[in-house]
Image (cartoon, rainbow, N blue to C red):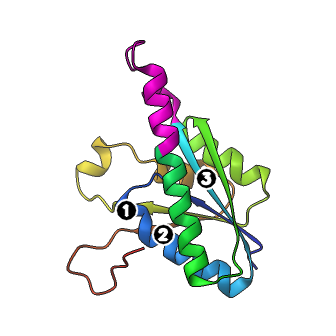
């Protein structure tokens, strides 16, 4: 059913549970895991010229650290589960979509902060854009509260 799973990560706490769920699904279906991090080109280009390259490098480093955490989670869950990692630059939703298509993904797993009420309209969501525009099925995994006993520490 699932041969290739893409985990989209931004390195935030809200993606940790999505990584754990994606790795679990991949292990159950013996699927390939691909992890992608997107350096937001809009954020880089809107920064002052004097710091633009430093910001790009810092975001790239942050992405590689986030991808390493996905790989570590996969190896902790199943020592035979390898993760192909990719850092891209562009509009996050578009790049996640393009990457998933390029690897012929069967599923994209993403974290979401689970905003409610007015905030969900005020704050743009990469996960929402991917769900609305990408033809690949998207599994969104909501971040749990600190008190929730299902909370993971990946």
For label 3, the residue is 36
For label 1, the residue is 14
Whole-angstrom CA distance, mark 3 to mark 1, is 15 Å
Labels 2 and 1 touching (C-beta < 8 A): yes
Labels 3 and 1 touching (C-beta < 8 A): no
Q: Circle 1 sits in a helix, a strand or a loop, which is it?
A: helix
User: Which part of the image, by quadrant, shows the C terminus?
Assistant: bottom left
The magenta region covers 40-61
Q: Residue furthest top?
A: 49
For label 2, the residue is 18
Whole-angstrom CA distance, mark 3 to mark 2, is 13 Å
Q: At 43% across and 68% down in the image, what residue appears?
A: 16
Question: Percent x, y for residue 39?
Answer: 52, 38
Question: Percent x, y for residue 41?
Answer: 52, 29
Q: Circle 3 sits in a helix, a strand or a loop, which is it?
A: strand
Q: Please, is residue 110 above or below residue 91 in the view?
A: below
> Along the polypeptide, which appears first: circle 3 or circle 2?
2
Whole-angstrom CA distance, mark 2 to mark 1, is 8 Å
- Local crowd size for mark 3, using a 10 Å CA cut-off: few (<14), some (14–19), many (≥20): many
């Amino acid at each position: 059913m699932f041969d290739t799973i893409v985990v989209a990560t931004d390195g935030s706490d809200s993606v940790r549970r999505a990584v754990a769920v994606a790795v679990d699904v991949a292990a159950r279906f013996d699927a390939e895991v691909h992890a992608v991090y997107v350096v937001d080109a809009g954020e880089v280009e809107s920064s002052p010229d004097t710091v633009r390259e430093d910001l790009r490098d810092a975001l790239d480093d942050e992405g590689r650290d986030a991808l390493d955490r996905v790989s570590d989670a996969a190896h902790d869950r199943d020592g035979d589960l390898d993760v192909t990692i990719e850092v891209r630059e562009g509009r996050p939703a578009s790049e996640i979509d393009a990457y998933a298509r390029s690897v012929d993904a069967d599923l994209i797993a993403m974290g979401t902060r689970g905003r409610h009420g007015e905030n969900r309209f005020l704050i743009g969501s990469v996960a929402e854009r991917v769900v609305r525009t990408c033809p690949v099925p998207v599994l969104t995994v909501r971040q749990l509260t600190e008190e929730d006993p299902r909370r993971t520490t990946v």
